[in-house]
Image: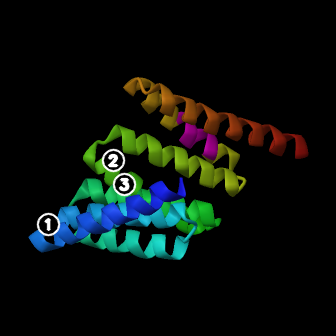
């Protein structure tokens, strides 16, 4: 695994140099995204955030909505991994807004699911359940079995938290 990750970084860095030589802003942004993901995979969240924020700024400058939504989502994932629920909620809500604006149901469902996990971390069972339910509906409509399973998992956790909270009352 480590060798593959090292090689992935080398390929992404090489692709970035080629994109830079061509002044291909979208390509540079994509290379930054991959480098940020690799840094996160290596546990270097500081570098992951820096590279992904650079990717986000570049996508914003060229008005690449898909790239913006993806960069925001990646920042949301990293914030979740770091336990920063406030930041995770903020960037996932931004990603959701961009995805809704584009009408991208896959990204809408993904953002809703991640927001449900954030709500769970904040012990907000009702919000988690509503978000996971909306994600589930979208994934079922799209026929995406894998993501439907992920949404069902989020909904199960929310229902469990609801039960735990009601038992403590």
Q: Tell me which secondary structure the magenta stretch mostly adopts.
A: helix
Looking at the rendered image, the disc whose residue lies closer to the viewer, 3 or 1, is 1
Foreground of the two, 132 or 73: 73
Label at residue 100: 2
Alpha-carbon span between mark 2 and mark 3? 5 Å
Residue 13 drawn above or below residue 65: below
Residue at the front extreme of this rendering: 3
Within the image, what quadrant is residue 131 found in?
A: top right
Residue 166 drawn above or below residue 5: above
**Is 126 covered by the magenta stretch?**
no
Structural crowding at the residue carrying mark 3, measured as other residues with C-alpha within 10 Å and reported as few (<14), some (14–19) or many (≥20): some
Of helix, strand and loop, which one carries label 1? loop
- Residue 7 location, x and y as percent? 40, 60
Looking at the rendered image, the disc whose residue lies closer to the viewer, 2 or 1, is 1
Structural crowding at the residue carrying mark 1, measured as other residues with C-alpha within 10 Å and reported as few (<14), some (14–19) or many (≥20): few
Q: Which residues are magenta?
A: 128-133
Alpha-carbon span between mark 3 and mark 1? 27 Å
Q: Which residue is mark 1?
A: 24
């Amino acid at each position: 695994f480590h060798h593959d990750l090292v090689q992935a970084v080398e390929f992404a860095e090489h692709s970035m140099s080629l994109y830079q030589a061509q002044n291909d802003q979208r390509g540079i942004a994509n290379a930054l995204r991959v480098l940020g993901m690799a840094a996160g995979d290596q546990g270097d969240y500081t570098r992951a955030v820096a590279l992904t924020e650079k990717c986000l700024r570049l996508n914003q400058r060229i008005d690449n909505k898909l790239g913006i939504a993806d960069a925001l989502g990646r920042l949301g994932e990293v914030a979740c991994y770091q336990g920063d629920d406030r930041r995770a909620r903020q960037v996932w809500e931004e990603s959701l807004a961009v995805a809704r604006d584009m009408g991208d149901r896959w990204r809408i469902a993904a953002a809703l699911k991640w927001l449900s996990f954030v709500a769970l971390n904040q012990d907000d069972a009702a919000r988690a359940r509503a978000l996971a339910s909306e994600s589930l509906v979208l994934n079922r409509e799209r026929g995406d079995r894998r993501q439907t399973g992920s949404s069902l998992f989020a909904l199960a956790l929310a229902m469990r938290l609801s039960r735990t909270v009601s038992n403590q009352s």
